[in-house]
Amino acid sequence: MRVTQKPLLSRPEQQLYGRLVRAFPGYVVFTQIALSQILVVDRGEVPGGSPSIANRQLVAEFVLCTPDFLVAAVIELDDRSQRREPRRARDQRKYQLLADAGIKVVRVPVDDIPNETALKALAAVGPAPSSPMRRTG
């Protein structure tokens, strides 16, 4: 068996990442974040309990956060795989969970990645607020 490394992001993902970083100065951009890291499901609210987010392997492609690490938006890069089952059902579940938590989802087509100005308009987030965290040391 031979093991080799591969880039964390595909070429289109790298392109979108660079544009997100330039479009949203002051924000933190994360990639490939499990929804279990940004959502908490209160099982008491759901009849019969809710399935674990972690067990569903739901991942947000890009998470735009304020300096204090609150989620401002999730950005998804859409390609042909979104048209196939079971991917479509998994994505619908992911988008519903994010919507239920009040998190905006921006879907970007892989064959027409918007420029920085268009990304700002799509995400509709303002300038990054100042971080309430204080540096010590």
Image: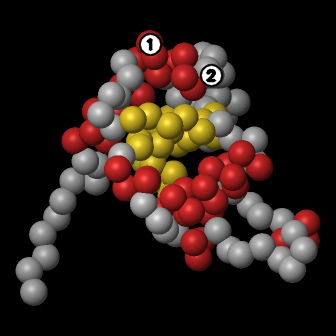
- Sequence-first disc among 2 and 1: 1
Residue at 33% in and 38% down: 110
Query: Compared to 112, does 61 lie above or below?
Result: below
* Quadrant of image for the C terminus: top right
Q: Which residue is mark 2?
A: 125
Residue at 91% from the left image edge and 66% from the top image edge: 45
Question: Residue at position x 37%, y 55% from top?
Answer: 81
Vertical position of residue 26 compared to residue 60: above or below: above
Where is residue 87? Give x, y as percent.
47, 62
Q: Is residue 65 visible?
A: no
User: Three-letter amino acid code at disc 2?
Assistant: Val
Question: Type of residue at label 1?
Answer: Thr
Residue 123 x/y as whole percent: 57, 26
Image quarter hosting the N terminus: bottom left
Left or right: 100, with 25 as reference point: right
Residue at mark 1: 117
For the residue pair 11 and 87, the one nearer the viewer reads as: 87
